[in-house]
Amino acid sequence: MNDAQSVSVSEQVPVAGEWDVVVCGGGPAGAAAAIAAGRLGRRVLLIEMQGRLGGLISNANIGTFCDTPGGPIFDELIGRLEALGAARVLRNLERYYPPGRWRCHPGTTATVLLEMAAAANVELMMMTVAERALVEDGAVSGVLVVNKAGRSLVRARVVIDCTADADIAAGAGAPFVQGDPEDGRIQHCNFRWGVQGVQTESLPPPEELEALCTEAVASGAIRPPDAIFGVDRDCFPFSRATGKLVLGGWELQHVDPTDPRQTTEATAQCQLAGLQIVRFLRERVPGCADCMMSSAGIFTTRESRRIVGEYTVTGEDVLAGAKFDDGAVPAWFWLDLHDPEPGLSTPYTLEFVQENRPKPGDWYEIPYRCQVPREVDGLLVAGRCISCDHPAQGSLRVIPTCMYLGETAGTAAAWAVEAGVEPREVDGIRLKRVLNEEYWRPPSYD
Ligand SMILES: Cc1cc2nc3c(=O)[nH]c(=O)nc-3n(C[C@H](O)[C@H](O)[C@H](O)COP(=O)(O)OP(=O)(O)OC[C@H]3O[C@@H](n4cnc5c(N)ncnc54)[C@H](O)[C@@H]3O)c2cc1C
């Protein structure tokens, strides 16, 4: 899109308003970005295409927040959730970095984020798609949005792209990459679904369940989706080792999350296979006569576009515990790549996890420059689509790090507006001092 086109589009649509900071996407990154900018007194609009905040937390019921720092806003969120009995920490010092891995209630998390956003005077525009950036003189100056009222333009001094897929940055002409540079392969997508109403005490022993499942696929009673990875392990909602119900979903390979034709096909196949499985279970498997799908399921994405920013954090940086003057976000989660090599995915051994993360007690830092896109001004990016290579994305895509990146972007955007400068001119060393050194302490194993 060139400038002339952008301006002509802006002339044809009504202007919905003007804000200091417009945040696109209300997931972990976007919610934290909006709260941070709002707390610093900026007028903030948060645009979210669903009817709730939390992104994958609430849309896909992901209630496990991995073991790595999440920043002051994340810590406050956890404190509020704990007070509601909606968060607890799992400690396992061999596998998880201290303090451990958080288990939180997804719906409560979404509403507490909403409460925090409201307290920070963040204005919300939900059920609204941020369609694309308005670019004027090489800088993003607003976003075209679409909702049930039609299309309109929201003007902004700074836009923060927290769409997880860098929708706004890509549309603004910012450079981006996708997947492994060798073959373009991205981490597995996932179809989250489950079965409810099973009388587990009446289920057959694991080996009998295994035989029934194998026969169902062999006979054609169940047609596994084309994209499913590891059919043997994942096709059924039961662990074949223990016979227990597994609520998690299917790993899907070779699906491009930015291609609606592919995602629609994969989603439809998974939903239909889920229905076939439920029919089969009801008819053939003891204990399942009254079972049904717990929901129609949802297609989820681990990795898609990654912007090319002023710095690109790498897998080597993660393993070496790289530190930077503007390294505002400390992190230590491991390189949790689903399908780093063909056929390799979770569950990984403890040794594999330990070999693929910073040394015990150490951490790496994500420079602020990773959130500043090359070539385009007026724009910051937060969440899983910042500037990183394919291996590093396996570490920094987790919820606490995405929230920390959001808080950094929201703070930087507020400072940029206050000083009347571009986001790329914000002092990254000061950001690090305020958001990292004044808040955070290295992991302690006491
Ligand atoms: C199957 C699966 C399991 C996972 N398990 C864990 C786990 O156990 N622990 C962990 O810490 N992490 C886990 N993750 C990773 C983590 O959930 C995500 O990487 C993280 O949520 C990314 O945060 P985000 O804010 O960048 O994006 P998202 O959480 O995807 O949020 C993006 C938000 O933007 C909205 N949006 C997108 N485009 C637009 C648009 N154009 N206009 C308006 N709104 C838009 C979306 O509706 C969404 O609300 C998992 C991911 C997957 C897929």
Image (cartoon, rainbow, N blue to C red):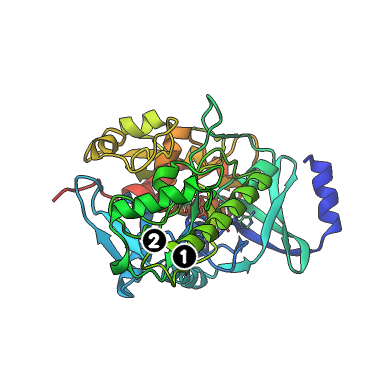
Comes first in the chain, label 1 or label 2: 2
Res. 327 image quadrant: top left
Q: Is residue 277 left or right of residue 8?
A: left
Please determine whether, in this image, residue 278 is positioned above or below residue 363: below
Task: Decide: few, some or many residues near mark 2? Use Cα within 10 Å; few <14, some 14-19, many ≥20.
Answer: some
Residue 372 drawn above or below residue 39: above
- Which of pointers 1 and 2 indicates the residue nearer the eye? 1
Circle on res. 283: 1
Which residue of the protein is positioned furthest toward the top in this rendering?
182
Task: Identify residue for label 2.
Answer: 63
The residue type indicated by label 2 comes to Gly
Question: In this view of the protein, which residue sits in the foreground, 124 or 95?
Answer: 95
Image quadrant where one finds the N terminus: top right
Q: Are marks 1 and 2 in contact (CB under 8 Å)?
A: no
Position of 174 with respect to 414 (left or right) is right
Amino acid at dot 1: Glu
- Relative to the observer, which residue lies in front, 442 or 297? 297
